[in-house]
Image: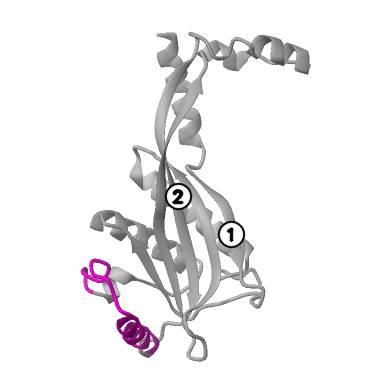
């Protein structure tokens, strides 16, 4: 029973926090800020419903920040990501985008998945407070014993890249960021958390969302 209470307590903590976190990012040293007149949002996913959900959430939040954004599922046929494209085909697609007024692409994809295990102490242990290292260490010596239960989850590694497709530049990478996402039974929350983390980072970097 105690281990069940501990698990419930832990799930409450996780549900209150964001399930995504920026791990690292890179910004072109030649770019101070970047505003797009029209950005294409692409979510690379085998699951069409997940791709649609992600692109919908991201374009919606970009529009709320006065950024003109279009879902790739609205611009291309559903088979766009199902087939590999040659360099010549990508050049043709880029011309289509330029002709349609696009000047940027925001491209997201999952790059890896890890199985994780976390140790959960009994709920009474969360009430312990320590005034010194000695107390903390003394009590924690028995941490890995029968009083611990274990919870497994998946950690998804995702990457988002922002490309400029300005006429004078050929698919120039402006920014790239890696965000980790903790598996969550509530897929809607996971998507919202990822988009929130992504947009906060872009705003901080003065990309697409400019704080003027």
Total marks drawn? 2
Viewer-closest of 59 and 25: 25
Viewer-closest of 129 and 81: 81
Where is the C terminus found, in terms of image quarters?
Answer: bottom right
Looking at the rendered structure, which numbered label has been put on residue 105? none
Find residue 57 and report its horizontal and vertical position in percent. 38, 58
| Residue numbers of the magenta segment | 77-98
- Can residue 131 be seen in the rendering of this structure? no
Where is the N terminus found, in terms of image quarters?
Answer: top left
Q: Are marks 1 and 2 in contact (CB under 8 Å)?
A: no
Q: Is residue 151 above or below residue 149?
A: below
Task: Judge whether residue 97 is colored magenta.
Answer: yes
Q: Which residue is drawn at 24% across and 58% down?
A: 48
Q: Which colour scheme is used?
A: one colour
Graded by Cα atoms within 10 Å as few (under 14), some (14 to 19) or many (20 or more), the crowding at tag 2 reads some
Mark 1, residue position: 25
For the residue labelled by badge 2, is the local secondary structure a helix, a strand or a loop?
strand
Whichever of callouts 1 and 2 sits on the residue coming sooner in the sequence is: 1
For the residue labelled by badge 1, is the local secondary structure a helix, a strand or a loop?
strand
- On the image, which quarter does residue 43 sit in? bottom left
Mark 2, residue position: 157
Q: Is residue 60 above or below residue 102?
A: above
Q: In this view, does 135 lie above or below 87?
A: above
Q: In this view, does 133 lie to the left or right of 55?
A: right
Find residue 209 and report its horizontal and vertical position in percent. 56, 69
- Can residue 78 be seen in the rendering of this structure? yes
Find residue 42 and report its horizontal and vertical position in percent. 37, 67
Find residue 36 and report its horizontal and vertical position in percent. 51, 78
Alpha carbon separation for disc pair 1 and 2: 13 Å
Q: Is residue 201 left or right of residue 86?
A: right
Q: Residue at x 42, y 51 (%)?
A: 192
């Amino acid at each position: 029973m105690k281990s069940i209470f501990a698990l419930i307590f832990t799930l409450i903590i996780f549900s209150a926090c964001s399930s995504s976190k920026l791990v690292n990012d890179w910004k072109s040293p030649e770019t101070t800020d970047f505003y797009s007149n029209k950005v294409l949002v692409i979510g690379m996913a085998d699951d069409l419903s997940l791709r649609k959900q992600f692109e919908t959430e991201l374009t919606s939040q970009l529009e709320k920040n006065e950024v003109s954004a279009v879902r790739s599922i609205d611009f291309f046929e559903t088979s766009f990501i199902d087939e590999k494209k040659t360099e010549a085909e990508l050049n043709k697609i880029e011309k289509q985008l330029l002709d349609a007024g696009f000047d940027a692409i925001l491209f997201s994809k999952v790059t890896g998945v890890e199985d994780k295990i976390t140790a959960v102490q009994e709920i009474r242990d969360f009430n312990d407070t320590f005034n010194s290292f000695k107390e903390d260490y003394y009590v924690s010596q028995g941490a890995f014993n029968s009083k611990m239960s274990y919870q497994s989850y998946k950690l998804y590694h995702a990457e988002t890249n922002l490309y400029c497709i300005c006429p004078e530049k050929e698919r120039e990478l402006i920014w790239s960021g890696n965000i980790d996402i903790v598996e969550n039974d509530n897929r809607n929350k996971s998507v919202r958390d990822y988009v929130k983390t992504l947009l906060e980072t872009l705003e901080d970097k003065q990309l697409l969302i400019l704080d003027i």
